[in-house]
Image: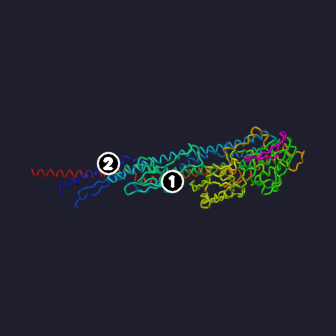
Amino acid sequence: MSLNDILGAAHSGLTAAQTALKTVSTNIANVGTPGYARERVTLTTAVVQGRVTGVNVGEPTRVADRFLEDSVYARAGDVGRSDAEATYLDRMQALLGQPGSEGSIPARINAVSAAAVAMTGLPNSPQTAGAFISTVQDTIASLQQLSRDTDQIKSDVEAEVGYTVERVNTLLTRIHELNGTVARLDGLGRSSAGAADQRMAAVEELSGLVGIEVRHQPDGRITIDSADGVVLLDRRLRQLDYAMPGGGVAQDNYPPVALRFADDAGNPGALTGEQLSGPASGGALGGLINMRDNLLPGFSDKVGLLFGSLSEAVNTASNTSTAMPPPAMLMGRATGFTGTDRLGFTGQAQFAVTDKQGTLIASTVVDFDALGPAATINDAVTAINAGLGGAATASIDAGGVLTFTAASTLNGVSIGQGTPPSDRAGTGFSQFFGLNDIVVSAGSTLAPPGFVASDPHGFAAGQTAELLLRDASGKTLASATLAPAAGGTVGDLVTSLNGGAVGQYGTFALDGQGRFTFSPHASFAGASLSIPSDSTDRAGTGRSFTALSGLTGRWAALSQAEVRKELVGNPGRLPLATLQPGIAVGQRALGSGDISGALAVVDNLAAVRDFAGHGVATLDRYTSDLMGNIGTAAAQAEDRLTDATARRDDAINRRDSFSGVNLDEELAQMVVLQNSYSAAARVMTAAREMYDTLIGMMR
């Protein structure tokens, strides 16, 4: 080997040691930097024409395991979703109040029962009657506040969805830029370790916002798909497209998160035709959408059912009773039915006129069975008026509101049940028309409609209702638009719904109370139905398909609920007495000390009720279950977050154990490299001395 070869080999050794020492120094400087993967210089033997000529020094490369990095991305998505759900479920739990506190919802329901019991012990007491009215008012107000608070949480979730989408787009743009940098540096044979570290940090943050799957390409790039299989990034940048609707106000339905192609600067272009599938997309975004579209609407639906059942319990009792003294006029609510609609009642009801002391002036018992199955509501009105001989008049207007008025303002009118009692879908005549309701709502009938398949649906052409079905995770399964054909029947509506897109996942039918029901197929158990928009109006009465169908908790119209205005501040109008049957004209038909109405309220509040797909229970049990279910869900979400965080931290530790900087190893490597440097320097010194000797010999 010539002296030039020796010097070249020594010089390459010095360069290799110097480059490796620089890399070790960089590793040591980043010993505490999160996400930094240590670097190593590749050294290979330089061989020219079969002879060793020194050392080839490669560019520094990252020491990383793709499998371990991908494991961190997967675990980060679980943490993001669990954290989002745990945060908002905890807020929901706080809305219900602490168990046992006076402000909690169960305590409010118990207070109504306690106030009803107090009325039974003090007949004719305006204090106990007034306390009952106030308690019912307070309970309705508490449920309304709970509903508004839930909507506020929903608005907050929606705002966070918007922020999350913006951050995802920023990260996708950043990763796309770094993809190009890594590919260019790798193509030039230069180190891409720094850019790859930055890209890994961006991908890790992205994986917490949306579930992703990362694929590594031969040129150093990565492509990213969402957890539900939608391409987020390949050689072409994409951006999430989402316009927040409603200006921060809670909505019944939200647009999907679509994708658009984008230029390298992140400016969106044409739609790709793909959409994220809501909760299935994973990460914080999936958790937020699950809260917004599934958990929060489901909770609101249950609160609506609670109010609907409470109002039915109170109104069922009040409509079998009357005030003492009786009012000169009873005005019902809009039922959604007009005078030409099928009557549908069986049994009997008593209609009476008394003076202010309860002495009977006129009375008639209407036998609805005798009117026949083809009888209309107008036929019942005619029978009432004929039986009372002008002492009082019943009438129904075009909006479906029934009015029963005494001919003289000195008298009052009362309605009682006969033997057998009047019945349509489990509801008496007075309750069906809301003539003696305590709780009212401008947006609801608060009573089952009692539809049969042959009833005309009463909706006009062009009116529509949108139905949306989501699975147990909140993912949209199907949507359908119900567009009733003019002149059709309720049975036609059921057939249309079963033949639509939603009908592929379950079965629509009419229950025993004439309400619509939806039973999902076994493979879609837990699916929930909602009606985001509805422009229908039955026969011009102002009652929509949503209000009459009973398919969701919205039928109860909690936001418009209140105690009947004439009762507020006038507890003497509270219906607590019962019209006595078989009383002759001139005798007392009403007693001033009668508390049978109060007893009926107590019994109804304690009775078992059907909560429309959410089981059969008492009001107290249902309320406790509602509170307990939210508490359980919040606790489970916290447990999932704890478990997911532990798994993610374990994945990070495994990744960092492999690719992180170990100070002892780096210092040991530095000693080795220093020795190598010294050895190469000694070789160079020896070669120089040999050169000096040769030159001296020539002199």
| Cα distance in 3D space between marks 1 and 2 | 47 Å
Q: Quadrant of the N terminus?
A: bottom left
For residue 670, the mark is none
Amino acid type of the residue that numbered disc 2 sits on in the rendered structure: Lys
Viewer-closest of 572 and 431: 431
Identify which residue is drawn at 23% across, 54% down: 9
Identify which residue is drawn at 34% across, 49% down: 24
Query: Between disc 1 and disc 2, whose residue precedes?
Result: 2
Q: Comparing marks 1 and 2, which lies closer to the viewer?
A: 1
**Whole-percent x, y for residue 556 in the image:** 68, 48
Residue named by callout 2? 22
Horizontal side, residue 169 vs residue 366: left or right: left
Q: Residues within 10 Å of mark 2 (few under 14, many from 20)?
A: some
For residue 275, the mark is 1
**Whole-percent x, y for residue 343 in the image:** 77, 53
**Whole-percent x, y for residue 455 in the image:** 72, 56
Q: Classify mark 1: helix, strand or loop.
A: strand
The quarter of the picture where residue 187 lies is: bottom left
Residue 664 shows up from this direction:
no
Viewer-closest of 429 and 59: 429
Q: Kindly check if marks 1 and 2 are in contact, taking CB atoms under 8 A apart as contact.
A: no
Q: Identify the magenta region.
A: 394-414
Q: Residues within 10 Å of mark 1 (few under 14, many from 20)?
A: some
Horizontal side, residue 258 vs residue 407: left or right: left
